[in-house]
Amino acid sequence: MASIRITHFSDILCVWAYISQIRIAELESTFSQDVVFDFQFFNVFGDVYAKMDRQWGGRGGLAAYGQHVQEVAAGFDHVNLCADVWSRNVPTSSLPAHLFIAAAKLLDSEQGSVVAPLFAASIRKAFFESAVNVSCRDELVALAEGQGIKAADLDSKLDSGQAHALTAQDYKNATELDIRSSPTMVLNEGRQTLSGNVGYRVLEANIRELIRHPVGQHSWC
C-alpha cells in the first residue's frame, strides 16, 4: 500500500505548533511504515509587530501576548518554555526561518537526507526554550550547522531564489486550502483537516481510519 501523505501547515513561531510537536513525533514513530509527513509553513507571524499592534494593541500589546503564551504552555507538562520568551530577543518575522527551512528541504531533495524537519524543530526549541531571535541570520546559520547543514549549501539555495520560490509555494498552498490556523494537518487528499490543539488520540484515530480505508474506498460522495 502506498504511504498516506499528510501535509502539516504551521508557522515556526506558533506556540500551538510547538506544543503539538511531541504528538507529531509520536505519530511519525508509530506510523513510520504507513505515513509520510510533508511539513509546510505559512504566514501567521510574517510581521510580528504589526500582528501584535493589530490583535493585542488594545490588550497590553506584546507583553500581554507573552503572558498569554506562558499561560497556554503552563497547561502542558511536556512543554519547557523560557520565562522571557516574547519579551527578550523578539523576532521581527517568521519569514527568515521559513526561508532557511525551505533551503534545507531543497538540500534534502538533492542529497536524499531528512534533515529539514529536525532543523525546523531545533528552531522552535531555540525560540521557545531559550528566547533565541530566530529572525536573525546568524542564529539560523548556527542552528543549521548544529544539524550538520553547511551554511554555504543553504546560501546556494537562498541566493538562487529557490528557497524563496518554495516558501512562496507553501504559502500559496495554504491560501488555496484556506488554512487559517497553525498548526493544521491536511489528510485524505485535502478532504479532511485537523486544526489547532488536537489531542494525540484523535490524530491517531484519523490516521488509523485512513489506513483501513484508503483514498477511493470511502462510501461518501
Image (spheres, helix red, strand yellow):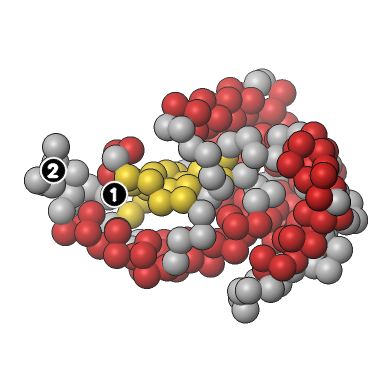
Look at the image and tell me whether residue 129 can be seen.
no
Mark 1 surroundings within 10 Å by alpha-carbon count, few (fewer than 14), some (14 through 19), many (20 or more): many
Disc 1 secondary structure class: strand
Give the amino acid at mark 1: Ile
Mark 2 surroundings within 10 Å by alpha-carbon count, few (fewer than 14), some (14 through 19), many (20 or more): few
Give the amino acid at mark 2: Trp
Place residue 79 in its image quadrant: bottom right
Query: Is the residue 201 above or below the residue 7 in the image?
Result: below
Q: Nearer the viewer, mark 1 or mark 2?
A: 2
Q: Which mark is residue 29?
A: none
Which residue: 13% across, 47% down?
Answer: 218
N-terminal of the two: label 1 or label 2? Answer: 1
Separation of marks 1 and 2 at Cα, in angstroms: 19 Å
In the rendered view, does 140 fall on the left or right side of 198?
A: right
> In this view, which residue lies farthest toward the bottom?
77
Q: Position of residue 175 (x, y in %)?
A: 50, 28
Which residue: 82% across, 44% down?
Answer: 58
134 or 176, which lies in front?
Answer: 176
Q: Quadrant of the C terminus?
A: top left
Look at the image and tell me whether residue 215 can be seen.
yes
Q: Which residue is mark 1?
A: 4
Place residue 49 in its image quadrant: top right
Disc 2 secondary structure class: loop
Q: Position of residue 208 (x, y in %)?
A: 25, 62
Q: Which mark is residue 220?
A: 2
Q: Position of residue 170 (x, y in %)?
A: 52, 32
